[in-house]
Structure formats: structure tokens, C-alpha cells
Amino acid sequence: MKVFVTGVGGQLGFDAMKELAGRGYEAVGSDIFDSVPQDFKYIKLDITDAAAVDKVISAVKPDAVIHPAAWTAVDAAEDEENIPKVRAINVDGTRNIAEVCKKLGCKMIYISTDYVFDGQGSEPWQPDCKDYAPQNVYGQSKLDGELAVAETLDKYFIVRIAWVFGVNGKNFIKTMLNVGKNHPEVRVVSDQIGTPTYTADLARLLVDMAESEKYGYYHATNEGGYISWYDFTVEIYRQAGMDTKVIPVTTAEYGLSKAKRPFNSRLDKSKLKENGFEPLPTWQDALSRYLKEI
């Protein structure tokens, strides 16, 4: 199997390449940088350039494309001047890739987010739920990317994830560790609920999917139960052996961010098991492995 991976300069793209190499598959990575420090086959590619996407992916002739590349700066996406860029990357770029996959007859795995829903209530979101109601520009752009994939292809996986952390890049854990080193206490929101996703574990699942033909919508985060960002922070400091005090606050008390954040990021993952995919390990176990890794 030959796989083309976008966004390899980020957390998930990096781990997807690592997982593919570990399993002996041929993998070609891409991103917008001139080069990446990792040692794998790399092609610079701007996914917003339809002609370049067609040329590059057609030359590779992959059996599957894993597409995590995206504009992910949620607050910056709200800025008027950034909205065209966000849509060019998350919507048009995704459509460009889907069009080439259709032409080549290859599978596409598109990485999406719980932000396609309204983030209210306490019921876990089902993967096949169509009650979309994005509350911010980022969420709308990821939903429109989903629709571009589903309308263009038959052989696709749309995988929604949440609260991502990986070795290669910035994330909540790294931020909290840095804050904890420099401050005796930290305020963290306790009314936004979800589950973290370790990209090394997710990469394994995505390659399992690429090996299969069980297409459709899926939700994939680590197991271990639903928690708040406050709960997550407490466990990060506990496992890291730090005595930083964590103070729970509401989203309102914390102060409004530019983009509206979901209170309910609970994702129902039972469809994975139903279709024969191995669920991800618990987030507590993932955190432990991650802390050793970094």
C-alpha cells in the first residue's frame, strides 16, 4: 500500500508517516514548508493550488490519502482578513484533494472535528448525526470540508477528533507544563467536556482504516471517559510530578475567547468497534506514554 499524507509538519501528519513507515508501507508526506526535519519522502505542496495538487498526487499514485492538513488556529480564524485563507485551506484545499482521489480511484481519510456540531447538551455526538450547527468560522470550514469529501467521493473516511496532542507541535499539554513551571497556580475551565486524542494512537487507527473498505463517518478519541480541561490538567500535573495548583473556572469566568468554544465535545466512538476497528487506549495511558516521549 502506498499512502500520501498531508500536513506532515504537524502533530498528526508526522505520526501518520511514522506509523506507515513502522508497518513497512510506502509513504509520501507533504506540507507548505520547503523541507521538514524528519527523514522521510517529502514533497512541498500548497493544497490550495488545485493544479499542483493534481500534478503531485497523480504522480505519486497512492492507494490512499490521509488528509490532516488544515488551518487549526481557531481564534485567528475569526479575524476578517483570515477568513478567506481559512476557507481556501480547509474547504477548497480539501475539495482539491478529493477531486484527485476521485480521478485516481483512491481512498481518502479526512480529519474533522466535533466543532461541526453546536457544542451544547450532554449527550455524546453520534458519527452519523447530521444536526450540524458550527458555532465559529473554523467549525464551519471543517464542516464544508466534510461535505466536499462526501459529495465528491464514495471511498472516504471522515474521522472527527478532539483535544489533540502529539510530539511534533504545540498543544495543551506542552502549554500546561510550561505554565506550571513558571506559576504556582493555574486557572482552567471545568465546564467544557470531552476526551483527549493522542496522535500516535490515532495514526494507528487511520492506517487500519486505510487497510480496510469500511467507509463512512467515525469518531475517534482516546478511551478513558469524558473529562473537563480542568480534570485533564490535574492529571497532567499528577503524572508529571508537579505540585502546581489547578483552580477550576467556568468558561464565562475564564473570559471569552474570540471564537465560541463547545461545552459538549463528547464523541460517541462505538461505531469503531462495530466495524471491527480497535479503539484507542485510555487517555490516562496515552498521557503517560506521551510524557515519557517528550
Image (cartoon, rainbow, N blue to C red):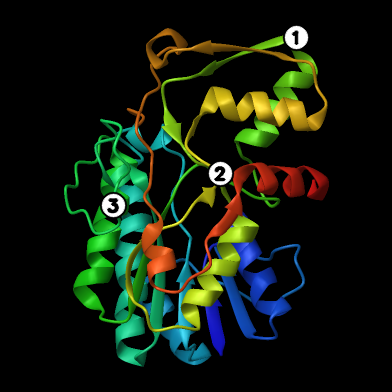
Judge whether 44 appears above or below 161 on screen: below
Question: Which residue is found at the position 53% from the left and 27% from the top?
Answer: 229
Q: In this view, does 87 lie to the left or right of 37?
A: left
Q: Estimate how packed mark 2 is, as few (under 14), some (14 to 19) or many (20 or more) residues with alpha carbons within 10 Å.
A: some
Helix, strand or loop status at disc 3: loop
Q: Which of marks 1 and 3 is in front?
A: 3
Helix, strand or loop status at disc 1: loop
Q: Estimate how packed mark 1 is, as few (under 14), some (14 to 19) or many (20 or more) residues with alpha carbons within 10 Å.
A: few
Judge whether 135 appears above or below 69 on screen: above
Dot 2 or dot 1, earlier in sequence: 1
Q: Is residue 57 left or right of residue 81?
A: right
Q: What residue type is labelled 3?
A: Gln
The residue that disc 2 covers is: 224
Q: In which quarter of the image is residue 103?
A: bottom left
The residue that disc 1 covers is: 184
Looking at the picture, how far across and down is residue 149, in whole percent?
28, 69
**Which disc is residue 126 wearing?**
3
Q: Can residue 5 be seen in this view?
A: no
Distance between the Cα atoms at labels 2 and 1? 28 Å
Helix, strand or loop status at disc 2: loop
Q: Nearer the viewer, mark 2 or mark 1?
A: 2
Q: Is residue 80 visible?
A: yes
Q: Which amino acid does label 2 sit on?
A: Gly
Dot 1 or dot 3, earlier in sequence: 3
Dot 3 or dot 2, earlier in sequence: 3
